[in-house]
Image: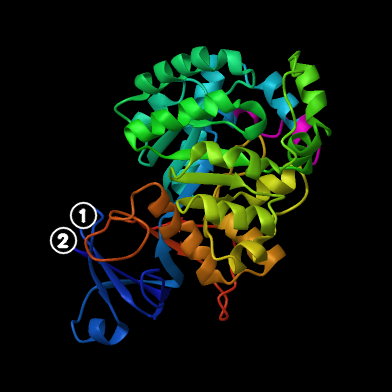
């Protein structure tokens, strides 16, 4: 038996918004019909009507489920270098508490209308949660190691974790430019080419990252000292971080995460070197860690594909994509419909799920969320009511 949902507005994303439209959904959650108000009136349907706007389920392209137990433990606005040190000190803990925190985070995302997640993992601990979840997860197993001599051993280790995650969707990815050697980048790319798999990488989160590559200065020297790493072998590239590492990836489909200090020259270089890039914004994490935001208007002007992420509960107070949209609308005045495409179809395209989710179209199972909008399409609240 079909259920018919209507609201002040329906935003299919794949087509213009429909005032008082109606969506018909079967018991499996599949969209059977998308009707205009007039079409629905002629059919004398039993319609469930809501105040607000119905939108597709959200896609969170960047999360760290493993770090959920660190909620409210790290001070805000310390800067990335100190934040990373806090993570290293805090990520271990009671196994039962860590697992309970992951289950709670997964449930929080589900209740906030998230239907798919690109999740960063450094170990196998989140597999059980993902297997039981109602959310689709693609796991990105991070490879880390700045010493090129250890690249082979590191790759062997993460390949083992990748195998352990199967049959769940999984791929091996670099953590960040400052933690992955050129040799390890090459091995990651070879693995991605072999499997035709997705890559995700933390990119240009802080000015310190560019300073390190350009002239071997900045706060990352303190981080390597904290880690006890000898980096005398490293020679600065005299280029920004992005322009230094991106050529190692070649043209693999890649998600650039954060992009807090990416400039026009970086974006121009990126577009010229890889046509398969997506740019993930995690605004609340940016504010939490560095108290700054990327140049969102520049990214819009450059017409790059943008997605949204929450990052982890170590750097965010909640896992809520609508809240990320709310933040971008507040600080950057991004139009709602643009934000919605970033939160839905763009993320679905990157995760290669756009045939199933991301838009309200017949034959898809995107999930339906009810949100509150003003008359001029301003987000009034970051509260989500999940309808299916």
Q: Position of residue 374 (x, y in %)?
A: 57, 76
Image quadrant assignment for residue 36: bottom left
Q: Is the stretch drawn in magenta largely helix, strand or loop?
A: loop
Q: Position of residue 39 (x, y in %)?
A: 24, 84
Give the residue displayed 52% in from the left and 23% down from the top. 122
Q: Which residues are magenta?
A: 69-82
Viewer can see residue 141 = no
What residue is shown with label 2? 1
Q: Are marks 1 and 2 in contact (CB under 8 Å)?
A: yes
Q: Quadrant of the C terminus?
A: bottom left
Give the residue displayed 47% in from the left and 64% down from the top. 341
Give the residue displayed 19% in from the left and 63% down from the top. 2
Q: Quadrant of the N terminus?
A: bottom left
Could you tell me which secondary element the residue under label 1 belongs to?
Answer: loop
Could you tell me which secondary element the residue under label 2 belongs to?
Answer: loop
Give the residue displayed 50% in from the left and 15% down from the top. 152
78 in magenta: yes
Q: Position of residue 209 (x, y in %)?
A: 73, 38
Q: Using the image as rendered, state which of residue 233 and residue 283 is in the foreground.
A: 233
- Nearer the N terminus, badge 1 or badge 2? 2
Q: Is residue 376 above or below residue 233?
A: below
Q: Using the image as rendered, state which of residue 190 and residue 161 is in the foreground.
A: 190
Give the CA distance from mark 1 to mark 2: 7 Å
What residue is shown with label 1? 27
67 in magenta: no
Crowdedness near tag 2: few (<14), some (14–19) or many (≥20) residues, C-alpha within 10 Å: few
Q: Position of residue 3 (x, y in %)?
A: 24, 64
Viewer can see residue 89 = yes
């Amino acid at each position: 038996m079909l259920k018919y949902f209507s609201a002040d507005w329906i935003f299919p994303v794949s087509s213009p918004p429909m005032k008082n439209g109606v969506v018909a959904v079967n018991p499996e959650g599949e969209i059977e019909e998308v009707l205009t108000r007039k079409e629905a009136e002629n059919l004398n349907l039993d319609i469930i009507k809501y105040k607000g706007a119905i939108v597709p389920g959200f896609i969170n392209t960047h999360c760290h489920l493993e770090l959920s137990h660190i909620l409210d433990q790290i001070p805000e606005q310390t800067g990335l270098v100190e934040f990373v040190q806090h993570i290293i000190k805090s990520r271990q803990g009671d196994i039962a508490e860590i697992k309970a925190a992951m289950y709670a985070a997964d449930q929080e995302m589900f209740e906030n209308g998230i239907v798919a997640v690109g999740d960063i993992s450094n170990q196998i601990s989140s597999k059980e949660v993902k297997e039981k979840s109602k959310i689709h997860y693609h796991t990105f197993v991070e490879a880390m190691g700045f010493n090129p001599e250890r690249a082979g051993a590191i790759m062997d280790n993460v390949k083992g974790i990748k195998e352990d995650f199967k049959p769940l969707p999984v791929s091996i990815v670099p953590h960040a430019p400052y933690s992955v050697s050129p040799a390890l980048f090459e091995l990651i790319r070879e693995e991605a080419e072999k499997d035709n798999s997705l890559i995700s990488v933390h990119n240009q989160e802080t000015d310190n990252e560019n300073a390190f590559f350009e002239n071997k200065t900045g706060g990352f020297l303190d981080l390597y000292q904290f880690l006890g790493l000898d980096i005398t072998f490293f020679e600065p590239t005299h280029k920004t971080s992005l322009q230094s590492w991106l050529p190692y990836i070649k043209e693999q489909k890649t998600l650039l995460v954060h992009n807090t200090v990416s400039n026009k020259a970086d974006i121009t270089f990126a577009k010229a070197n890889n046509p398969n890039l997506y740019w993930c914004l995690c605004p609340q994490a940016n504010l939490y860690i560095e108290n700054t935001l990327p140049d969102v208007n520049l990214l819009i002007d450059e017409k790059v594909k943008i997605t949204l992420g929450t990052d982890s509960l170590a750097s965010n107070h909640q896992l809520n994509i609508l809240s990320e949209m709310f933040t971008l609308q507040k600080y950057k005045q991004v139009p709602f419909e643009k934000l919605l495409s970033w939160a839905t179809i763009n993320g679905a395209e990157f995760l290669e799920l756009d045939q199933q989710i991301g838009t309200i179209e017949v034959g898809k199972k995107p999930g339906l969320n009810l949100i509150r909008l003003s008359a001029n399409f301003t987000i009034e609240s970051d509260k989500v009511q999940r309808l299916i």
